[in-house]
Amino acid sequence: MISDLDCYPCLLRQALETARIVTTDTALQRKVMNAVMKLLPNLAPDNTPIRNAAHIHQLIRSILGVDDPYKTIKNRYNQLAADRLPQLKGILDRSADRLQTALRIAIAGNIIDFGALGDRFDFDATLEKTLTDPIGIDDTDHLWRQMSQAASVVYVGDNAGEIVFDRLFIEELLQRYNIDIRYIVRGAPVLNDVTVKDAEFCGLTDLVAVIEAGEAPGCEIDHAPAAVAKAFQQADLVLSKGQGNYEALSREPFPIYFLLKVKCPALARDINAPLGSSVVKRSSATMEKL
């Protein structure tokens, strides 16, 4: 997905929110905003939104002098998600289809996104709608068919907090299918995206192999360590969580299923799904393999 004009005001919003998280010094906040506004016209319009966001957030962190502006927020949402596990496991236990319900819970968790939404989301309302409403783009039947034929799966994580719900889904996948799963996290902090520390917090490192990618808010294969490209090449199937990973991977030639909430107009237009809807969408490469 290439950058949309709507991406530019979104990057400015992210810059201001990040600066306000770190400091109450309005002069420093203004310095961040001025630097970002100066950089925006120089970003390549055919870059993915994620590549442009990587440049912007690298600049923001350098001006603020903070490596992980969202550290406290990530820890808080990891704990809030962990506190909900008894409730969510109860939902799974009462479900007639545990795997389908675990998939919907994982998609609901994608609402925890400080890049697309800041802190303007309601998880309880999102969970209720995601469990009951029809999926906007629904390729789940194809997903289960391909999963039953797969031996190796790459699961690309997205946000802190959300990773706790990913683990629930991964546990169900491992119980149902004879598969090896490798989970991709960011190689350095950016926004509230998952890192290996988040995977360790929720015990995911005890369950599957965890691989670190780059420091953009999405998994860019061309900007990641060789181990990431190798994992994609060897995988029979890729599960990609969230908007940032869709932006980075939507044109990659791998069998990918995109699992996400549609949270911005630019993505809604590109993926052709209503704003706010849930999506389980297979890539064109996936269709060719069926």
Image: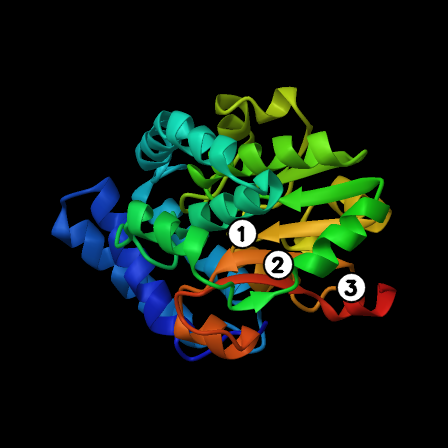
Q: For this view, does 224 lie left or right of residue 21?
A: right
Which residue is label 1 attached to?
Answer: 216
* Rendered view: 6 above or below 104: below
Q: Quadrant of the N terminus?
A: bottom right
Q: For this view, does 118 lie left or right of residue 177?
A: left
- Res. 71 image quadrant: top left
> Which residue appears at 26% of the width and 61% of the height?
33
Which residue is label 2 attached to?
Answer: 258
Q: Position of residue 14 (x, y in %)?
A: 32, 58
Which residue is label 3 attached to?
Answer: 286
Residue 257 is marked as: none
Residue type at mark 3 is Thr
Callout 1 touching callout 3 (CB < 8 Å): no
| Residue 52 in sight in this render | yes
Residue type at mark 2 is Phe
Looking at this view, is 58 or 275 the one in front? 275
Residue type at mark 1 is Ala
* Rendered view: 141 above or below 69: below
Q: Secondary structure at mark 3?
A: helix
Looking at this view, is 67 or 158 the one in front? 158
Looking at this view, is 233 or 61 the one in front? 233
Report, in whole angstroms, how far the alpha carbon at label 1 lies from the one at label 2.
18 Å
Q: Position of residue 228 (x, y in %)?
A: 73, 44
Q: Secondary structure at mark 1?
A: loop
Q: Position of residue 139 (x, y in %)?
A: 66, 63
* Rendered view: 89 above or below 49: above
> Which residue appears at 65% of the width and 66% of the height?
250
Q: Could you classify mark 1 by the number of other residues whose Cα lies within 10 Å: few (under 14), some (14-19), or many (20 or more)?
A: many
Report, in whole angstroms, how far the alpha carbon at label 1 lies from the one at label 3.
25 Å
Q: Position of residue 195 (x, y in %)?
A: 52, 35
> Which residue appears at 31% of the width and 65% of the height?
12
